[in-house]
């Protein structure tokens, strides 16, 4: 069994402090300014706001802990950055303990949630709360080994996350080039693309897929021969099952609800559950990996793909599933990139109604106007991008498996229930 120390004994605690409001900017001047969990990503925060007069500065490698609801969330600074009141800096006294402390604090996140729920910290954690927090503290060799084992898993998850971002950016950039900015058409119009010639992103064999003129339409200029239609011309929309309040259970068959539909990938960690008996009643609402869902209440217009899972979820009401089996329909990649455009979400929101909570109907979503390119360029886009979407889903599924393994190993390694050498061998056998 590992011993324990107070966090303040092994790390310096620095509470965040917000700089003057007039020093904020979104143009990149000064240091990135992180205010709370809204800035957190998987492991490192994402800059959104900058400030020119920082009051508290985090250094690369500093652990950032949220001290306002939700308390206990963890990220790690990967650059010099300014820290606001919603965060604290946990700076290990021995830098070699940084990764171990990071994992321990992640493990303790649920404990913070329990304390916060009891009201004993009143929605904020103080410096004293952090300094007196008791953390498991095995030998130095064990700390290093545990950090290495869990870090191996975490680094692979982070690599997958970055690969997913890169792949999605590629798909969305090509879609925008072909179907929003009409770059191939403009290149032909301006004489920059000649038959038999290849340009970056435009191989010669695609030349005949695109016209060489733009014509006026109700949506502005569009390529000659392309049409203005509605989303309903490209796909259908299937609504979810109306589960009853008595149907929900603590575990069983997962159900994708409106809060699960996160941009890009559906979050299967944010689901509810029903029993197997209830699931049988709703079997025709069973989802499959690669299904494209859209939020129709609250977070209207958010779209996400269902990732691979060993326990396929069901679809709840107020979440829609796009149907791609219609004659002449688009394939998944084209529809995914179309619905991930910021303009699409704005259009869905414009169709929503309701004051307490916005909601949109299937008819409203399908009535959204869009450009309908001919089948040939759509098919070519899908041939390019369907394997990319498959890779995105595969990487995401692998990351979920690795995260579950990491979360299962963490407390067992720290408590000595699993020997470090056994865990190292386990990872080596799996090529990690």
Image (spheres, rainbow, N blue to C red):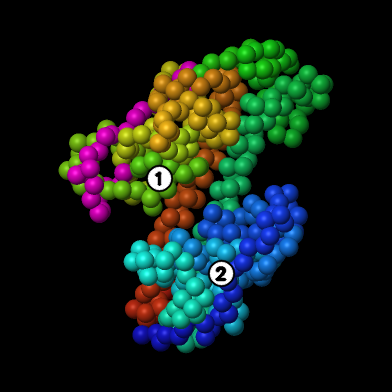
Whether 355 is drawn above or below 40: the answer is above
Horizontal placement of 33 versus 357: left or right?
right
Magenta region includes residue 249: yes
Give me the residue at 67% from left, 56% from top.
Answer: 21
In the picture, the quarter occupied by the N terminus is bottom left
Which element carries disc 1, helix, strand or loop?
helix
Which element carries disc 2, helix, strand or loop?
strand
The residue carrying pointer 2 sits among few (fewer than 14), some (14 to 19) or many (20 or more) residues within 10 Å by Cα, namely many
Q: Residue lying farthest left?
A: 277
Whether 117 is drawn above or below 260: the answer is below
Give me the residue at 62% from left, 31% from top.
Answer: 175
Q: Looking at the picture, how far across and down is residue 312, in whole percent?
A: 32, 44
Res 360 seen here: yes
Whether 367 is drawn above or below 416: the answer is above
Q: Looking at the picture, how far across and down is residue 239, in whole percent?
A: 34, 30
Dots 2, 1 in contact, CB < 8 A = no
Give me the residue at 45% from left, 85% from top.
Answer: 5
The residue where tag 1 is placed is 260
Which label was assigned to residue 88?
2
Magenta region includes residue 131: no
In the rendered structure, which segment of residues is drawn in magenta?
231-255
Which circle, 2 or 1, is nearer the viewer?
2
Q: Quadrant of residue 421?
A: bottom left
Q: Earlier in the sequence, mark 2 or mark 1?
A: 2
Q: Quadrant of residue 327?
A: top left
């Amino acid at each position: 069994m590992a011993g324990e120390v107070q966090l303040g004994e092994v790390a310096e605690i620095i509470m965040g402090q917000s700089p003057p409001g007039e020093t904020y900017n979104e143009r990149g001047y000064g240091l990135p300014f992180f205010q709370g969990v809204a800035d957190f990503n998987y492991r490192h925060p994402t800059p959104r706001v900058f400030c020119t007069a920082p009051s508290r500065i985090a250094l690369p490698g500093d652990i950032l802990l949220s001290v306002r609801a939700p308390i206990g969330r963890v990220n790690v600074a990967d650059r010099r950055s300014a820290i606001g009141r919603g965060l604290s800096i946990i700076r290990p006294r021995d830098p070699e303990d940084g990764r171990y402390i990071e994992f321990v604090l992640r493990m303790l996140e649920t404990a913070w949630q329990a304390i916060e729920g009891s009201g004993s910290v009143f929605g904020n954690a103080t410096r004293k709360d952090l300094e007196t927090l008791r953390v498991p503290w095995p030998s130095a060799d064990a700390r290093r080994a545990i950090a290495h084992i869990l870090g191996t898993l975490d680094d692979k998850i982070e690599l997958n996350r970055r690969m997913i971002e890169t792949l999605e950016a590629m798909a969305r950039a090509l879609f925008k080039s072909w179907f929003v900015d009409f770059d191939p058409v403009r290149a032909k119009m301006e004489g920059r693309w000649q038959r038999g010639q290849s340009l970056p992103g435009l191989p010669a064999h695609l030349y005949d897929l695109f016209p060489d003129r733009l014509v006026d339409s109700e949506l502005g200029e569009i390529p000659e021969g392309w049409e203005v239609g509605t989303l309903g011309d490209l796909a259908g929309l299937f609504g979810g099952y109306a589960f009853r309040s008595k149907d929900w259970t603590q575990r069983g068959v997962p159900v994708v609800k409106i809060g699960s539909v996160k941009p890009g990938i559906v979050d299967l960690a944010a689901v509810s559950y029903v029993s197997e008996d209830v699931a049988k009643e709703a079997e025709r609402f069973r989802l499959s990996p690669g299904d494209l869902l859209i939020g129709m209440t609250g977070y209207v217009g958010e779209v996400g793909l269902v990732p691979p899972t060993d326990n396929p979820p069901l679809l709840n009401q107020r979440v829609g599933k796009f149907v791609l089996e219609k004659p002449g329909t688009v394939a998944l990649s084209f529809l995914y990139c179309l619905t991930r455009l910021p303009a699409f979400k704005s259009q869905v929101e414009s169709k929503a109604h309701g004051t307490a909570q916005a909601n949109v109907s299937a008819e409203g979503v399908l009535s959204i106007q869009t450009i309908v390119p001919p089948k040939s360029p759509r098919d070519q886009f899908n041939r390019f991008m369907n394997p990319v979407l498959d890779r995105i889903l595969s990487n995401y599924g692998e990351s979920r498996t690795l995260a579950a393994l990491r979360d299962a190993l963490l407390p067992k390694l720290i408590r000595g229930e699993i020997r470090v050498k056994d865990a190292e061998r386990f990872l080596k056998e799996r090529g990690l």
